[in-house]
Image (tube, grey):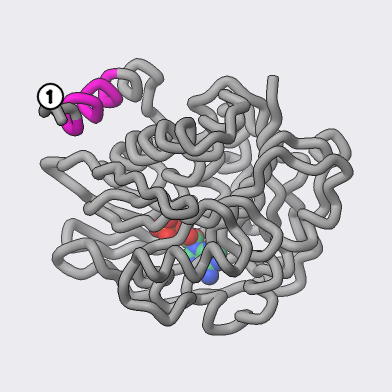
């Protein structure tokens, strides 16, 4: 089985949407990526850090999904990373209310020995120096390195972010962040500029408006499934990244054509994530539900015009 190495936050989140509010619940980029990638035939491990305030049941959940957690350091007396966000009525925009780095501030990642030859590395959202350090520890060059990031790191660690961006094959980023990173309003120009920074493939996520994949002068678009009810978009981007990198890991094919399928898998899994608060929907989701919604995706985008 191919191996996927995941790096990112394992966190406490407090979320408020127009439909309700949660106290500190399980969150974090690596958590969502891991849960999403667990729908593929692969071996995966998370590299992250938590404090000893982090409940064992959350770690057990990850283990129950066959995720190797030996790379999650537990800092004695430390506090887990905490993030809090407030969504506006349209659910497309959110304000970050709190970001407490806590144990993440001093984190030195350690890649488990048996993952230093991982086929795919998914650098989830956290400090770019941590992302770089993980790449430094790889003993065999991965077939694909995917990076996800956000405006927080552009604001507080831009030079370090630009350094790690140079080293990756694929970047996944949302539209506003792509504009901030490139200084271009047009997403086409933005993607071209970001490709010049290093990654050959640029995925721009547009929330409920789908995702764009750019490679050289080619572009592919995957819609998001129109859903009757969206409760909480938290983690949708990470779930997308987990589906994308999980599918590539399983299929061992890093062509542009196969990345189109990976984007559809990512969008499909993300469409479930938003149906309930936090990780709740991903925890109970079945492979049969994933397969059936994939069919809906196909119907949504199929047409028969002869050209
Ligand atoms: P998403 O909705 O896909 O952007 O991801 C939301 C998740 O990202 C939440 O579970 C947070 O714990 C995590 N998160 C929020 N801010 C940061 C940050 N600055 N660095 C790393 N992870 C973060």
Report which residue position mark 1 lands on. Answer: 304
Decide: is 70 above or below 210. Answer: above
- The answer, for residue 82, to whether it is visible in the render is no
Decide: is 20 above or below 287. Answer: below
Q: Residue at x 61, y 80 (%)?
A: 158
Q: Quadrant of the C terminus?
A: top left
Q: Classify mark 1: residues with Cα within 10 Å, few (<14), some (14-19) or many (20+).
A: few
Viewer-closest of 245 and 305: 305
Rendering quarter of residue 166: bottom right
Residue 161 in percent (x, y) is at 64, 72
Decide: is 177 above or below 242. Answer: below
Based on the picture, tell me whether residue 221 belongs to the magenta stretch: no
Q: Quadrant of the N terminus?
A: top right
Q: Main secondary structure of the magenta part?
A: helix
Residue found farthest to the top: 288
Q: Which residues are magenta?
A: 292-301
Q: Residue at x 25, y 44 (%)?
A: 224
Rendering quarter of residue 147: bottom right
Rendering quarter of residue 62: top right
Based on the picture, tell me whether residue 293 belongs to the magenta stretch: yes
- The answer, for residue 224, to whether it is visible in the render is yes
Residue 287 in percent (x, y) is at 40, 19
Residue 290 in percent (x, y) is at 34, 24
In the image: residue 68, left or right of residue 273? right
Viewer-closest of 234 and 79: 234
């Amino acid at each position: 089985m191919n191996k996927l190495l995941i790096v990112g936050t394992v966190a406490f989140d407090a979320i408020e949407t127009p439909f309700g509010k949660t106290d500190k619940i399980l969150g974090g980029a690596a958590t969502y990526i891991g849960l999403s990638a667990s729908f593929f035939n692969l071996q995966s491990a998370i590299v992250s850090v938590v404090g000893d305030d982090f409940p064992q049941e959350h770690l057990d959940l990850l283990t129950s999904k066959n995720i190797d957690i030996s790379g999650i350091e537990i800092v004695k007396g430390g506090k887990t990373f905490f993030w809090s966000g407030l969504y506006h009525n349209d659910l497309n925009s959110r304000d970050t209310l709190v970001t407490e780095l806590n144990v993440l501030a001093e984190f030195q990642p350690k890649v488990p020995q048996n993952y230093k030859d991982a086929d795919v590395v998914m650098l989830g959202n956290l400090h770019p120096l941590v992302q770089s350090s993980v790449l430094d520890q790889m003993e065999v060059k991965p077939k694909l390195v995917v990076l996800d990031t956000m405006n927080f790191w552009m604001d507080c660690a831009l030079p370090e972010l630009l350094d790690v961006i140079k080293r990756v094959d694929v970047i996944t980023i949302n539209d506003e962040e792509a504009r901030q990173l490139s200084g271009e309003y047009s997403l086409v120009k933005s993607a071209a500029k970001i490709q010049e920074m290093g990654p050959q493939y640029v995925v721009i996520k547009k929330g409920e408006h789908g995702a764009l994949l750019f490679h050289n002068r080619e572009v592919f678009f995957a819609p998001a499934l129109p859903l009757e009810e969206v409760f909480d978009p938290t983690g949708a981007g990470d779930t997308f990244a987990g589906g994308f990198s999980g599918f590539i890991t399983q299929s061992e094919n890093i062509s542009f054509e196969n990345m189109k399928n990976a984007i559809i898998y990512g969008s499909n899994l993300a469409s479930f994530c938003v149906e309930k608060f936090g990780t709740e929907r991903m925890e109970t989701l079945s492979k049969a539900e994933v397969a059936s919604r994939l069919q809906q995706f196909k119907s949504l985008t199929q047409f028969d015009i002869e050209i």
